[in-house]
């Protein structure tokens, strides 16, 4: 096969796209639309005709300029949580909408680094979402290097991630509810 020198992705598409497999793809898509103002590409919605149970084998949702593919998990597929980062303009509103739809706050809106803040939530399907948003940047004093280490003790951004990651399990499987 002869290769061309053009970009590998179609014009207007991203190079990397996530794929989330959940129990209940249709309600998950509704969650994404409500929380992130996502839009589903209706022409991509593909029911699993072979299963005949109404599940989706493929769907596509645009969140901002990114594509997230979605499918229903099959009974013999293991639970696999998605860990997804999304840039948002209003983290408080995004968190409010997520919690209103059954999400659990993992990390409240917190300062981070590089001019950004961070917040995290666990959706009802037990996927972990990182929200990044522009925040007032605090610059190091003249001549100082920026540091990842804020204090001798780990902060909330660190501890909430570690506490949540060890509890991830499928809904109803004894994990974080």
Image (cartoon, grey):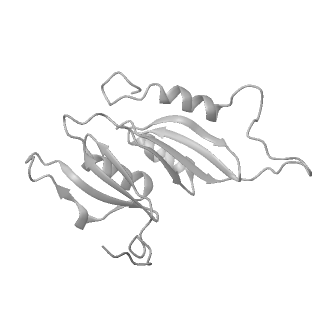
Q: Nearer the viewer, residue 58 or 41?
A: 58
In the rendered view, tell whether residue 65 sits above or below residue 145: below
Residue 1 at what x, y percent from top left? 30, 73
Residue sitting at 49 percent across and 44 percent down? Answer: 96
The residue positioned 41% from the left and 58% from the top of the image is 17
As drawn, the residue found furthest toward the front would be 1
93 relative position to 157: left or right: left
Which residue is rendered at x = 43% and y = 78% of the image? 6
Number of numbered discs: 0
Q: Quadrant of the C terminus?
A: top left
Q: Is residue 10 above or below residue 89?
A: below
Residue at figure coordinates x 13%, y 48% from the top left? 54
Residue 131 placement (x, y as % from top left)? 54, 48
Could you tell me residue 126's position as x and y percent?
38, 35
Q: Residue furthest top?
A: 174
Residue 44 image-quadrant placement: bottom left
Does residue 29 appear left or right of residue 135 in this picture? left
Residue 152: percent from left, percent from top: 77, 26
Residue 163 vs residue 2, the one in the foreground: 2
């Amino acid at each position: 096969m002869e290769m061309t020198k053009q970009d590998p992705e179609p014009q207007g598409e991203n190079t990397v796209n996530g794929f989330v497999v959940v129990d209940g793809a249709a309600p998950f898509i509704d969650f994404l639309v409500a929380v992130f103002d996502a839009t589903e590409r209706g022409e991509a919605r593909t029911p699993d005709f072979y299963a005949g149970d109404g599940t989706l084998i493929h769907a596509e949702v645009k969140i901002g300029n990114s594509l997230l593919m979605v499918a229903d998990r099959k009974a013999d597929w293991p639970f696999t949580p998605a860990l997804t980062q999304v840039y948002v303009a209003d983290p408080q509103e995004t968190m409010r909408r997520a919690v209103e739809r059954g999400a659990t706050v993992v990390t409240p809106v917190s300062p981070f680094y590089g001019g950004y803040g961070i917040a995290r939530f666990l959706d009802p399907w037990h996927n972990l979402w990182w929200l990044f948003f522009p925040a007032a940047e605090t610059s190091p004093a003249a001549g100082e290097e920026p540091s990842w280490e804020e204090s001798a003790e780990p902060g909330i951004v660190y501890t909430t991630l570690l506490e949540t990651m060890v509890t991830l399990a499928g809904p109803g499987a004894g994990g974080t509810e």
